[in-house]
């Protein structure tokens, strides 16, 4: 599988509030990936960084192959647009380089698929939240993006539009697109999402938290090979120190990790509990 996007040691802070901490991630082509986490954990921030709409405080977002076509659906699509859906889609399509002929053919099809054709005599600022969201989705998928980024796309969508979106995602994936999305409960996406990451305390993990309010444990170990630790999903992050390793572990899984360390005859120097709400590291 071809590497598509790479996040290298990404950190992001807003006014000294650390949102993402040293996140590294490789996204392969033709993948459907979900990034989940509680409110305010930084899901939208990661998506905006990958879309190139924001810059990390440190680290890099790399597109190894080429300049790729990215479709981005923000969590809240701007409400104050005074164009009708067709006018707006035609305008966006033209600036993203879609031919007039393709726009003439595709815009009515998408409006029909998302049940907007009867509303096309209204301006977007007169539409409901869900219908505005549909326009936001169409503007992103219309250009057949190689990378489609959807930030909570189903909030406000009726059941039929949710199913249509699911279908569009499947079609794009079949054509080779990569899809990156975030959502809350649900969900209709569970069958198509191949990899799920969870954000917790600014770190990205493949392990789901039992309780997002739970704390973290920082375990300082010696005489342990980092290549072994890299395989452990409970370890959210690992830092090399002068004479050992510092492991960031979900509190619920710390006993499991501690017994694994002992089984490998590593020595545990110190275990610190860090409150989820607290500042746990000065960077
Ligand atoms: N432009 C900004 N300026 C200042 N702080 C910001 C900015 N954008 C996000 N934040 C802060 O960064 C943190 C993460 O925000 P983000 O929107 O990425 O979270 P989220 O996981 O998408 O949340 P939600 O599920 O509520 O949409 C929040 O504390 C938020 O207040």
Image: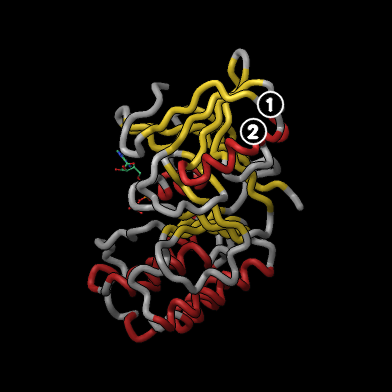
Q: Quadrant of ligand 1?
A: top left
Depicted 26 relative to depicted 99: above or below: above
Q: Quadrant of residue 170?
A: bottom right
Whichever of labels 2 and 1 marks the residue nearer the N terminus, that label is 1
Across and down, in percent, residue 261 comes to 64, 33
Left or right placement of residue 242 versus residue 73 in this view: right
> Residue 201: which numbered mark, if any?
none
Query: Dots 2 and 1: beta carbons under 8 Å?
Result: yes
Separation of residues labelled 2 and 1 (CA atoms)? 7 Å
Query: Given this view, does label 2 or label 1 mark the residue nearer the observer?
Result: 2
Task: Residue at 53%, 29% (x, y): give it.
Answer: 59
Name the residue nearer the viewer: 81 or 205. 205
Q: Residues within 10 Å of mark 2 (few under 14, many from 20)?
A: many
Left or right placement of residue 69 versus residue 107 in this view: right
Depicted 116 relative to depicted 217: above or below: below
Q: Which residue is mark 2?
A: 261
Across and down, in percent, residue 148 comes to 54, 59
Q: Residues within 10 Å of mark 1 (few under 14, many from 20)?
A: some
Task: Residue at 52%, 29% (x, y): give it.
Answer: 219
Across and down, in percent, residue 5 comes to 63, 45
């Amino acid at each position: 599988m071809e590497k598509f996007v790479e996040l290298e040691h990404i950190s992001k802070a807003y006014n000294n509030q650390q949102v993402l901490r040293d996140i590294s991630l490789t996204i392969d082509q033709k993948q459907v990936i979900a990034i989940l986490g509680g409110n305010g954990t930084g899901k939208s921030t990661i998506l905006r960084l990958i879309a190139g709409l924001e810059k990390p405080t440190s680290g890099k977002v790399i597109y190894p192959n080429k300049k790729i076509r990215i479709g981005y659906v923000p969590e809240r699509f701007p409400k104050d647009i005074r164009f009708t859906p067709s006018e707006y889609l035609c305008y966006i399509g033209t600036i993203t380089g879609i031919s007039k002929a393709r726009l003439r053919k595709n815009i009515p099809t998408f409006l029909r698929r998302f049940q907007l054709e009867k509303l096309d005599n209204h301006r977007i600022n007169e539409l409901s939240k869900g219908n505005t969201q549909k326009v936001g989705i169409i503007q992103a998928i219309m250009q057949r993006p190689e990378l489609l980024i959807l930030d909570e796309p189903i909030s406000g969508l009726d059941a039929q539009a949710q199913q249509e979106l699911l279908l569009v995602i499947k079609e794009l994936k079949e054509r080779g697109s990569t899809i990156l999305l975030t959502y809350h409960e649900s969900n209709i996406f569970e069958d198509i999402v191949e990899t799920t990451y969870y954000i917790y305390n600014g770190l990205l993990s493949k392990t789901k938290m039992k309780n997002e309010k739970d704390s973290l444990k920082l375990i300082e170990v010696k005489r342990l090979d980092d290549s072994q630790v890299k395989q452990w999903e409970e370890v959210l992050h690992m830092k090399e120190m002068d004479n050992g390793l510092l492991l960031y572990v979900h509190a619920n899984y710390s006993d499991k990790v501690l017994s694994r360390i002992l089984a490998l005859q590593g020595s545990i120097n110190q275990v610190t509990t860090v409150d989820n709400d607290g500042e746990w590291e000065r960077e």
